[in-house]
Amino acid sequence: MSKRTRILAAVMATMVMTTAFLGCGSDSTSKDSGDKKKLLVWSHLSTAEVDAIREVAQKWGEENNVDVTVNEDKGEMQAAITTLQSSKGPDIYYGLAHDNLGTYNKAGVLEEVPSDFINKDDYASEGSIDAITIGGKQMAVPLSAECVALFYNKDKVKEAPKTMEEVADSGSFMFNATDFYLTYGFLSANGGYVFKDNNGTLDKEDIGLGNEGAVKGLDFIQKLVTEKKLFAADITDDIAKEKFKAGETSFYISGPWSVGDCKDINLGIEPLPTLAGGTMKPFMGVQAAFVNSKSQNKDLAWKLMKYLNENTNDILIEKGNRLPATKKGQESDKFKANKDASVFVEATKNAVPMPNIPEVQQMWTPGADNLKQLLAGTQTAQEAGTKIVEQMKQGIEQAK
């Protein structure tokens, strides 16, 4: 999920992968080869999803006399942007967290979606459309939507709690509280926000992660460690998940991607409960797809995009544990067979799309760093909120 911490090994891997893609690009870019055209697709989805999507894409290619190549992109954002801007870049990027779209758009690699491509009535959530809309224009296509929820062990909990205070008082709760993606619902419950939303336009100058509501949420998170002593300050998701799976804890916060890992317990899932009387509003993440503005075969790319959108819903459900963004996808037999899917659909009704403007990239590191300081007890909730805002503004200014 939001694995924002970058390590040297990942950077080196990115450099190697980017070189590899550039080196082999001449064999798979969208250029004419006799009578047969070529399309190149990249995806940041899971390996299992990419493998299955490759079969669908190549089936379309065979039926339309197009040589289609689908590659999994495991690299970093800037590496992908650099290749997208070159003649070696993919024609379609199928599967990218939408909070990256603003950065890709700024780099000039997003082709605006044709006016008749997206019918809003076909989508289950208005939020999924908002997530791919930049400056009033639809710059990508929503594939799936997701958010976090409260996992609980039905063998240990008779009834799902209505409030987060009940969860904290249980003495049996653990989650990665240093992950800003997972904790945002605590800050938003009573009025915290990332950027002020002025009728669809996000104001990067107005950051609400240090206001009274956000500080109230940060204070609650801190007390889980300092007063309730539910988990250590250096908690990780792996530790929290293993404790939950082993039946050592009753509650855990995660998303659809963790359901399969918890299949061996009597699992219950509910939307996040209230906090201090306010509705917790977690981040909504949308996996999106776009056509590269540098593609030499845009019309053909949109045709393949349409085919993929119509034929990959079951793959997203089965291979990725994702919630298809379309109503049709959520009405499929595969989706209905997933007993937990409807709960996550309900949870997304309270979720807010992560900001998709480039400035949101300056949120993750200050968020994580100050949560660590908060849990370690080296700063107060007010200090943490203030520093998150200050450091975000500094990052935004430096990135200009």
Image: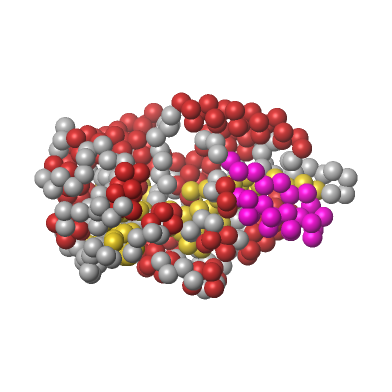
Q: Is residue 9 magenta?
A: no
Residue beneath the point at 21% across and 44% down: 231
Instruction: Point out the stretch of residues depicted in magenta.
Output: 50-73
User: Looking at the rendering, in which quadrant would you find the C terminus?
Assistant: top left
> What x and y, as percent, mark residue 163?
19, 63
Residue beneath the point at 14% across and 56% down: 169
> What x and y, as percent, mark residue 245?
33, 53
Q: Is residue 64 magenta?
A: yes
Residue beneath the point at 88% across and 49% down: 35
Residue beneath the point at 76% across and 35% down: 26
Q: Is any atom of residue 13 visible in this view? A: yes
* Residue 312 image-quadrant placement: bottom right
Q: Is residue 59 left or right of residue 329?
A: right
Q: Is residue 130 left or right of residue 207?
A: right
Q: Is residue 47 above or below residue 392?
A: below
Q: Is any atom of residue 194 visible in this view? A: no
